Amino acid sequence: MKRFILIVLLGLALAGLAAELVDRIVAKVGSEIILMSDVYKHMQQMRSSGVEVERFSPEAILQQLIEQKVISQKARELDIKIDQTKVRQYAERYLQQIKANYPSEEAFLNDLAAEGMTERELLAFYEGQITENAMSEKLVENYVSSQVSVSEAEMLEFYTATKDTLAVKPTTWEMGLIMQEIKPSKDTEDAALEEIRDLQRRLNLGEDFAALASQFSDCPSKERGGDLGFFGLGMMVKPFEEAAFSLNIGEISDVVRTEFGYHLIKVEEKRANDVRARHILKILNPTSEDSLAARRTMENVRALYSSGEEEFEVLARRHSSDPEVEKNGGIIGEMAATEFPDLFAQHIVPLAVGEMTPVLENEGMLYLFVKTREIPPRVFTFDEVKDNLNSYLLRQKQVQAYDAWIAKLIEDAFVEIVR
């Protein structure tokens, strides 16, 4: 059966709605009715929510209300439950977002009054819409979405038939990257370790832990004598957690190394599965000398590449700290000019193929980019658009399945348009 062929032209009737609305039944959905005032009120509520109601015909509004009715009826039939507490929370949150767009509460209420609505009515509208949407999503997932899929063969057939009409992929470049983190040198680490060892010796001689933490710790907790409060398992990095939970009350740990630096830990209290501890932290930060040394290394890498003494892949495997370098040899993918990292685009765009950028720095990392190969404009390959094709074809199938499903619901519910 074609989808709902009983739509009556309501344009003239709704156009005649004014301050004095002569109400009447415009549709029957099973044992329920839809009044002309329901259509008009729904339009007002949509307008108050910021929807451009003018984009919708009265027929479309009526159809929307009919679909809501049959979905609600089906949900009740199947005993679909929606958490109304969450619905109210979402509705109130959305209402607050709408109100935030107004300069004052008074301006918001004045706008509502102009539409003949109250704040409570608008909130009820939001609750109804959220409830309807939630029920609809559950029903659609069970009876539409879960029943639809797209095969590889369907995607390939569509791609073959339409690939010549697809947008052409612009000129791209295969990009190589060597990256290196600026890390503390061994001398820097040794100096920090000696500092924490000295504090450990002072503690062993009986000095107060909290006092030393307040004076020498690099953690913001120094303002509280190093007190971290209570914490449970999984709240701290593993080496710190293991040390803290192995200590007895009043006991001080040996030096603990974590990604943040060197720690001394003292447990103050224990309760159930939590401990309260203080710590003294000496952060491991690279010095200016460490930064200069890392930059010199990267400048040397650039010189070796530019002179042709070393191949890019060899240099990448030897010097890059990218965890993927062993798999990709420093090649990070194919990029168009619009896809270059914004932070470095001005340096990458003018590069010739085979040319390397200067050493670039950001947030403790050094970078060298190179265009290893230019790829001329071409039609996208199947693999490149496969995910998009799947989404597009799946959406088409879902819309078709939804139309058939809602038409069947309407037919089963016995919908009648009252002329």
Image (cartoon, grey):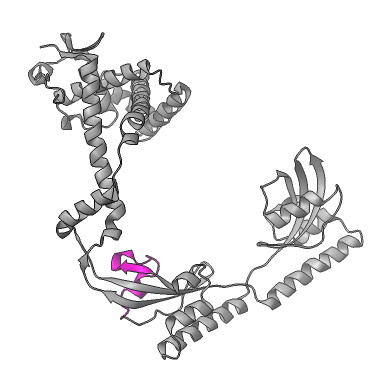
Q: Position of residue 323 (x, y in %)?
A: 52, 67
Q: Which residues are magenta?
A: 333-352
> Is 400 left or right of 107, judged from the image as shown?
left
Image vertical order of residue 98 relative to residue 335, above or below:
above
Q: Nearer the viewer, residue 240 or 5?
A: 5
Q: Position of residue 246 (x, y in %)?
A: 80, 51
User: Can residue 340 be found in the magenta stretch?
Assistant: yes
Task: Give the quadrant of the N terminus.
Answer: top left
Instruction: Say which residue appears at 65% left-offset and 62% top-offset.
Output: 259
> Is 284 left or right of 370, judged from the image as shown?
right
Image vertical order of residue 99 relative to residue 345, above or below:
above
Name which quarter of the figure residue 293 lies in.
Answer: bottom right
Q: Position of residue 317 (x, y in %)?
A: 50, 77
Q: Nearer the viewer, residue 27 or 337?
A: 27
User: Can residue 392 be found in the magenta stretch?
Assistant: no
Task: Give the quadrant of the C terminus.
Answer: top left
Image vertical order of residue 230 relative to residue 387, above or below:
above
Residue 66 shows up from this direction = no
